[in-house]
């Protein structure tokens, strides 16, 4: 019966928990702090919208929370470097632009249309989330613009192709 692990031993559980959390280097970087703020603000505004009369707006914070937590996981574990087929900065840019616009709209509606306190709180957290998402897409835009100014050159050289167009006449 040596197959069953001793329930009092928690040695195997600690590394699993630490592997899910972002590394200290990433969490203290600008991108890491922005993603952590996006996750936190999206979750808080989700809770506020769920408890308010403006519960119809609960979908936006939930989707942004899930998107931000996925990208936090992807960037902190370097998951994005294993999948080179996706343009991760562009996906992150589109996510931040749409999030900031939609958060701004639903925050205005929550503050102006509804009178309960949790709707007002959700609107305030939505405005703060709008600013954080706007900062994130501003920094991503600057990185993408500098990348495109360099001509989109990456460290990998594409293989050289030799095309002979003179042979196309002799079909």
Image (tube, rainbow, N blue to C red):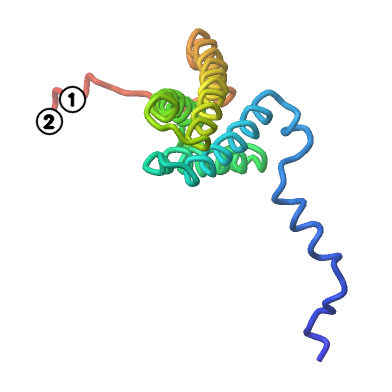
Viewer-proximal residue, 21 or 167?
Answer: 21
**How would you rate the neighbour count of disc 1 (Cα within 10 Å): few for under 14, some for 14-19, many for 20 or more?**
few
Mark 2 crowdedness (10 Å alpha carbons): few <14, some 14-19, many ≥20? few
* Residue 5, numbered label: none
Residue 80 rendering spot, x and y as whole percentages? 57, 38
Q: Is residue 44 above or below residue 139?
A: below
Q: Residue furthest bottom?
A: 1
The quarter holding residue 57 reads top left
Left or right: 55 in relation to 77: left
> Are the residues flagged by discs 1 and 2 in contact, CB closer than 8 Å?
yes
Residue 170 lies, in percent from the top left, at 14, 26
SS assignment at label 2: loop
Quadrant of the rendering where the C terminus is positioned:
top left
Q: Position of residue 123 (x, y in %)?
A: 49, 29
Which residue is drawn at the image coordinates 54% and 12% (left, top)? 142
Look at mark 1 in the image and give the residue it sits on.
168
Q: Is residue 129 left or right of residue 27?
A: left
Q: Which residue is mark 2?
A: 171
Residue at x 61%, y 39% (from the top left corner) = 72
62 versus 160 height, above or below: below
Residue 160 showing in the rendered view: no
Q: Secondary structure at mark 1?
A: helix
Label 1 to label 2: alpha-carbon separation:
6 Å
Q: Would you identify the image quadrant in which residue 132 lies?
A: top right
Q: Would you say 79 lies left or right of 94 here?
A: right
Query: What residue appears at the point 77 percent right and 51 percent down from the top-left corner?
Result: 18
In the rendered structure, the answer to whether residue 162 lies left or right of residue 123 reads left
């Amino acid at each position: 019966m040596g197959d069953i692990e001793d329930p009092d031993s928690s040695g195997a559980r600690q590394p699993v928990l630490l592997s899910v959390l972002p590394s200290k280097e990433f969490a203290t970087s600008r991108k890491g702090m922005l993603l952590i703020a996006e996750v936190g603000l999206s979750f808080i505004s989700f809770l506020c919208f769920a408890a308010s009369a403006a519960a119809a707006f609960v979908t936006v914070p939930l989707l942004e929370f899930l998107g931000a937590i996925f990208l936090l996981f992807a960037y902190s574990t370097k998951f994005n470097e294993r999948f080179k087929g996706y343009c991760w900065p562009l996906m992150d840019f589109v996510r931040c632009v749409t999030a900031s616009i939609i958060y701004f709209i639903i925050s205005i509606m929550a503050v102006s249309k509804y009178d309960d306190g949790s709707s007002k709180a959700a609107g305030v957290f939505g405005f703060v989330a709008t600013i954080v998402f706007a900062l994130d897409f501003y920094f991503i835009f600057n990185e993408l613009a500098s990348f495109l100014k360099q001509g989109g050159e990456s460290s990998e050289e594409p293989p050289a192709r030799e095309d002979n167009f003179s042979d196309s006449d002799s079909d």
